[in-house]
Structures are given as structure tokens and as C-alpha cells.
Amino acid sequence: TQYLDEADALAGAVVFINAGEVVATGTPDQLKARAGQAQLDLVAASDADFALLASALGGFQPASDGTHRAVRVAVRGSGTAGLGTLSAVTETAVQSGARVERFSLREPDLDDAYFQLTGHTRPAEAKDSA
């Protein structure tokens, strides 16, 4: 199926094929684990807050988007280790003094796994880089 949310919910095993070649196989959870870590997205309340936040979180190697005042940090580790990383990131954000308008924590999904494992660019990313 091309509907990866359906495959995630119903399939016991998933095979990713790219240009006629099998690039990955496993359970949905195994493939999602290969896609990387959870992502913490923070949106600053102002441009000044964005600058504070991006600077303070620099040690976590964030992806920053000044246009949307957004900072994305990969939460390295899982379980207790992941919670430790999440705690360090949020504590650093609070200590920066930056006002955060909103935040979200997102686990990788099968779409993330597909794009990561095949090396394809997401359609939205292709538009952003054009």
C-alpha cells in the first residue's frame, strides 16, 4: 500500500521498495526506530525570543526556521535516556528567558522512515528548498 498510516496500523511487516530494490524491511516499529529520534518543536513568541532560544539550544544542534520563529531539536535516546535529553532541552529553553508560544513533541512515523531510508526528499521540503 502507499498509505503508510494504514500500514502502520494494520501490517505486521513492511517492505520499502525504491526503484525496484528492497531498501528496508521490518515491523512498523522497527522501521520507525530506524528513522531517528522524536522531535521537539518550539515556536518563539517574537523574533527576539527566537534569537534567544536558537542561541541557547545551539549545543543540541537544532534546526532553526527564523521565518516561522521555530526551533526543532532531536530528542536523542529513548525511554529514560530520552526523558533526560528532553528535560535538558526544556530546562535550557526555560533558562534562556525566551518566551515560547507553543511546543510539540512528535515521534517518527512511517513516512519519516520511508524518506530517511530511501533518501527521498519530502514534497514539502522540496517546495521549501526551491
Image (cartoon, rainbow, N blue to C red):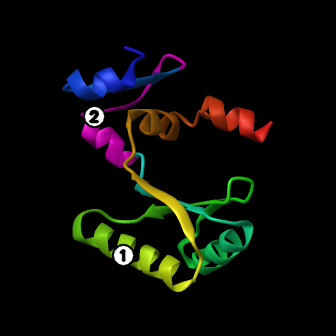
Point out the residue furthest to the left here. 12
Q: Where does residue 83 sit, x and y in percent of width and height?
A: 30, 70
Q: Earlier in the sequence, mark 1 or mark 2?
A: 2
**Could you tell me if residue 41 is visible in this image?**
no
Q: Is residue 59 left or right of residue 23?
A: right
Q: Is residue 83 left or right of residue 65?
A: left
Q: Is residue 119 left or right of residue 33?
A: right
Q: Which residue is mark 2?
A: 28
Magenta stretch, residue numbers: 19-34
Q: Where does residue 48 sit, x and y in percent of width and height?
A: 72, 73
- Identified at 43% across, 74% down, the residue is 90
Query: Is the C terminus in the top left, top right, bottom left or bottom right quadrant?
Result: top right
How many other residues sit within 10 Å of disc 1, few (<14), some (14-19) or many (≥20)? few
Residue 26 lies in the magenta stretch: yes
Q: Nearer the viewer, mark 1 or mark 2?
A: 1
Q: Amino acid at mark 2?
A: Pro
Residue 2 lies in the magenta stretch: no
- Identified at 34% across, 65% down, the residue is 77
Camera-side residue of 100 and 27: 100
Query: Is the N terminus in the top left, top right, bottom left or bottom right quadrant?
Result: top left
**Could you tell me if residue 16 is visible in this image?**
yes
- Identified at 67% across, 59% down, the residue is 69
Q: Which residue is mark 1?
A: 87
